[in-house]
Image: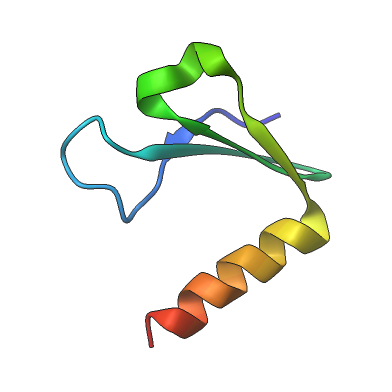
Amino acid sequence: MSDWHKSSYSGGTNECVEVREHSTGADVRDTQNRRSGHLTFSGPEWHAFVDTLHSASE
């Protein structure tokens, strides 16, 4: 499993989202509330989410 990394859309503050991608999808957590756990998305769910973000930014 890969390491957690900050979203490239996050600014220089700690108010951001971290992602950990893996073979079955991705996990997402809030950097300010790491102990609260994370959300897990399947591969198709994660790809649909990322594709939607890319479409919205165009």
How many numbered marks appear? Answer: 0
Q: Which residue is situated farthest in the top direction here?
A: 35
Left or right: where 45 falls relative to 58 = right
Q: Position of residue 20 (x, y in %)?
A: 59, 36
Dividing the picture into quadrants, the one containing residue 44 is bottom right
Q: Position of residue 49 (x, y in %)?
A: 62, 65
Q: Position of residue 53 (x, y in %)?
A: 49, 71
Left or right: where 39 falls relative to 5 = right
Q: Quadrant of the N terminus?
A: top right
Asked which colour scheme the image uses, the reply is rainbow
33 and 5: which one is in front?
A: 33
User: Which residue appears at 83% of the width and 44% of the height?
Assistant: 24
Q: Position of residue 39 (x, y in %)?
A: 66, 35
15 and 9: which one is in front?
A: 15
Q: Quadrant of the C terminus?
A: bottom left
Up/down of 16 relative to 54, above or below: above
Up/down of 17 relative to 43, above or below: above
Up/down of 12 relative to 2, above or below: below
Up/down of 52 relative to 10, above or below: below
User: Which residue appears at 51% of the width and 30% of the height?
Assistant: 4
Dividing the picture into quadrants, the one containing residue 43 is bottom right
Q: Which residue is situated farthest in the left direction here?
A: 12
